[in-house]
């Protein structure tokens, strides 16, 4: 599913080169639930940007679902993101002026799916995360946990092979956080591949496998107990 | 992503910021509105002047006396005598004095164009009476206070009555109505039916301007137009001592003078339109840039989810085009309103509604949207998704 080999990301800060990722190699198989853990500044956000095809590495290769994506152009990356990746962000990142169902529709709009089909799939996705009765509410009318579940519906509406969650519980109270984690587990059981990025060991412990990252290098890679 | 979707998104964003969108449009609205109004006014005036020149009949020569560079003058009698001496070339000559005067009959009053002329005016201008008689030479010879009135005047002041033989006060002096002109303009206010014709000798006294600055001459036939003009020019040059004090022109020359004035007018209008639309366009670019900055996060989300540069570009471009398009439509409506109620209402001239100019100014406003929307849209499309998502 994911095969990263010798990936480096170097930022030039004046005369210094900062290795945000230093020779990282990582393999993630289909249907895995992996947590990537590390403190801030460890390079986990950079790794997340690479995994999410938001940025390209300085060197190394990245195969996602059989495609080499480390050398693609902006527009090609956008297409990969659209078709292969569902994003869940810490800050939900919903569009405030759109209703829940309109937010969920967005990835399908950029795929060129017709209106009826979009609405049908979006409502299905919202029902799956338990928000079938909130389809026409705007984000402001929903609680944090509900907003994050709308974001999850948006991430899974186009059935992408990879779901990438960046601190999905970071902005939520513990009950909503538990709800969101339960939804992610449910998705995992349905056969989705999930990569969870977090600094919280308790959250990470719920994944099947934990990858620790420090100073741009992977320091530990183990099955969770 | 279809255009319909982009269109819906743009509409939503414009409707979500009504006041700002309206203020942004204002430049285009004012630009388009003023162009349409100005064109209607210019074409209306041009048309009425063209009509009156063409309505002069054939073989017409006009004389304009400015008196520039000369302290001498010429009277109606002198020119009349000259015309009679050259009757082989000149068949008729009508002096013209006109001004706006206040008419009163009984308790009613109105402001109307009063023309002072003679019996030849009837044939030169093709203004015949439907009842009564026209001004005759003895009206001028004896300075009789007689008047021939247009149908608009008759309908207003003598509603339903026969105006012939009635008395009418013009600037306080009592005149007798001797004729009613044929209706040629549907009896509308401010048209050629809203006129009164009186003897020129009386008009000179009434208006306190002893000098007549306009004469209309009819040549005997088309072959004598040129010799008649030459003779008149020679006679007037001799009379005034120089050739700057007057002008002698035929119909074709008058039309070409008018056309050159119209062309200049259109260039000026075009310039005003261009400037106001550029100003409007800069306003749109400014707001679109602000909008792109404000919506950086939205752009980041859309790009993360899979929007390509093209999608973002189209979204912002359509928004700009829609703002100017709506502005263009509102501008046309406001222009039509101004034409109807300001030009029409103040009876300055009969405006011409020009669909060509409306389409053109609408098209230009769309063009302004494209040109000035392009840079902000390009900026939005180029945003880096990671930085855009981090934007607070």
Image (spheres, grey):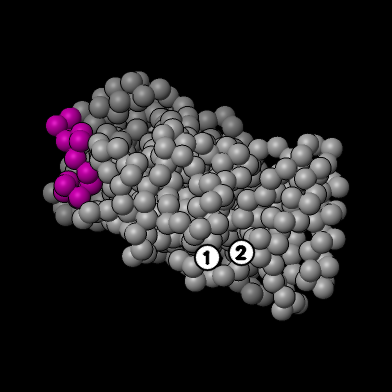
Mark toward the start of the polypeptide (1 vs 2): 1
Please, is residue A169 above or below residue A32 in the view? Answer: below
What's the residue at 44%, 33% (across, down)? Answer: B130
Instruction: Using the image as rendered, state which of residue A14 and residue B121 is in the foreground.
Output: B121
Q: Is residue B150 left or right of residue A101?
A: right
Q: Residue at x 52, y 30 (%)?
A: A65
Q: Circle 1 is placed at which residue position?
A: B204
Residue at mark 1 shares a chain with residue at mark 2: yes
Is residue B30 at least partly visible in the picture?
A: no
A133 left or right, relative to A63: left
Region rendered in magenta: A130-144
Q: Tell me the subunit letter for badge 2.
A: B
Work out which quarter of the rendered image holds the C terminus of chain A and state it: top left
Q: Position of residue A43 (x, y in %)?
A: 48, 59
Judging depth in this view, the residue of A66 and B143 nearest the camera is B143
Question: Where in the figure is residue B105, as x and y percent of width and height?
Answer: 27, 53
Q: Chain of mark 1?
A: B
Q: Is residue A138 magenta?
A: yes
Q: In the rendering, at what x and y percent does residue B140 appear?
A: 54, 55
**Quadrant housing residue B171:** bottom left
| Crowding at mark 1 (Cα within 10 Å: few <14, some 14-19, many 20+) | some
| Quarter holding residue B72 | bottom right
Gap in angstroms between the C-alphas marked 1 and 2 = 8 Å
Residue bearing mark 2: B212
Total labels drawn: 2
Question: Is B16 situated above or below B306?
Answer: below
Residue B177 seen from this side: yes
What secondary structure characterizes most of the magenta part? loop
Q: Residue B192, position in %: x, y?
A: 47, 44
Under circle 1, the secondary element is helix
Badges 1 and 2: C-beta atoms under 8 Å apart?
yes
Residue B13 left/right relative to B322: left
């Amino acid at each position: 599913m994911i095969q990263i080999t010798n990936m480096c990301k170097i930022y030039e800060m004046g005369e210094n080169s900062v290795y945000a990722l230093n020779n990282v190699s990582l393999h993630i198989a289909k249907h895995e639930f992996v947590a990537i853990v590390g403190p801030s500044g460890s390079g986990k956000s950079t790794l997340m940007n690479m995994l999410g095809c938001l940025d390209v590495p300085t060197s190394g290769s990245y195969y996602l679902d059989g495609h080499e994506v480390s050398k693609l152009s902006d527009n090609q990356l956008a297409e990969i993101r659209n078709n292969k990746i569902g994003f869940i962000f810490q800050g939900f990142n919903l569009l405030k002026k759109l209703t829940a169902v309109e937010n969920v529709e967005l990835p399908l709009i950029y795929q060129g799916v017709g209106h009826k089909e979009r609405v049908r799939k979006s409502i299905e996705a919202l029902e799956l995360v338990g928000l079938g009765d909130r389809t026409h509410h705007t984000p402001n009318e929903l609680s944090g946990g509900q907003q994050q579940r709308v974001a999850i519906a948006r991430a899974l509406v186009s059935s992408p092979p990879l779901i990438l969650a960046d601190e999905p519980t970071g902005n939520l109270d513990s009950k909503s956080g538990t709800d969101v984690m339960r939804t992610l587990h449910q998705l995992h059981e349905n056969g989705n591949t999930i990569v969870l990025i977090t600094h919280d060991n308790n959250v990470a412990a719920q994944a099947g496998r934990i990858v620790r990252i420090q100073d741009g290098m992977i320091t530990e890679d183990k099955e969770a107990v | 992503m279809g255009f319909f979707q982009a269109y819906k998104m743009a509409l939503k964003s414009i409707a979500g910021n009504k006041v700002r969108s309206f203020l942004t449009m204002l430049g285009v609205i004012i630009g388009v509105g003023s162009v349409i109004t100005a064109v209607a006014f210019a074409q209306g005036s041009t048309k009425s002047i063209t009509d009156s020149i063409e309505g002069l009949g054939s073989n017409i020569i006009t004389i304009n006396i400015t008196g520039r560079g000369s302290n001498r003058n010429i009277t109606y009698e002198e020119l009349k005598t000259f015309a009679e001496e050259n009757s082989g070339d000149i068949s008729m000559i009508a002096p013209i004095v006109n001004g706006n005067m206040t008419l009163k009959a009984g308790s009613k009053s109105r402001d109307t164009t009063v023309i002072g002329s003679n019996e030849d005016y009837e044939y030169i201008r093709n203004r015949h009476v439907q009842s009564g008689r026209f001004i005759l030479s003895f009206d001028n010879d004896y300075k009789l206070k007689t008047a021939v009135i247009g149908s608009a005047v008759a309908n207003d002041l003598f509603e339903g009555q026969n105006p012939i033989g009635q008395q009418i006060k013009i600037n306080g002096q009592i005149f007798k109505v001797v004729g009613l002109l044929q209706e040629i303009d549907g009896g509308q206010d401010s048209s050629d039916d809203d006129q009164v014709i009186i003897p020129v000798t009386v008009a000179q006294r009434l208006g306190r301007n002893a000098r007549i600055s306009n004469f209309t001459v009819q040549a005997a036939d088309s072959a004598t137009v040129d010799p008649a003009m030459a003779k008149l020019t020679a006679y007037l040059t001799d009379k005034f001592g120089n050739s700057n004090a007057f002008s002698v022109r035929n119909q074709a020359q008058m039309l070409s003078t008018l056309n050159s004035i119209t062309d200049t007018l259109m260039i000026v209008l075009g310039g005003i339109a261009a400037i106001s639309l550029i100003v409007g366009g800069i306003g749109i670019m400014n707001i679109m840039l602000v909008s792109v900055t404000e919506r950086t996060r939205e752009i980041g989300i859309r790009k993360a989810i899979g929007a390509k540069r093209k999608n973002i570009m189209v979204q912002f471009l359509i928004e700009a085009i829609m703002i100017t398009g709506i502005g263009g439509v509102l501008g046309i409506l406001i222009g039509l309103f101004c034409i109807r109620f300001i030009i029409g209402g103040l009876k300055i001239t009969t405006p011409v509604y020009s669909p060509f100019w409306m389409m053109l100014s609408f098209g230009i406003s769309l063009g302004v949207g494209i040109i000035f929307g392009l840079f902000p849209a390009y900026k939005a499309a180029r945003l880096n998704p990671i930085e855009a998502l981090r934007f607070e």
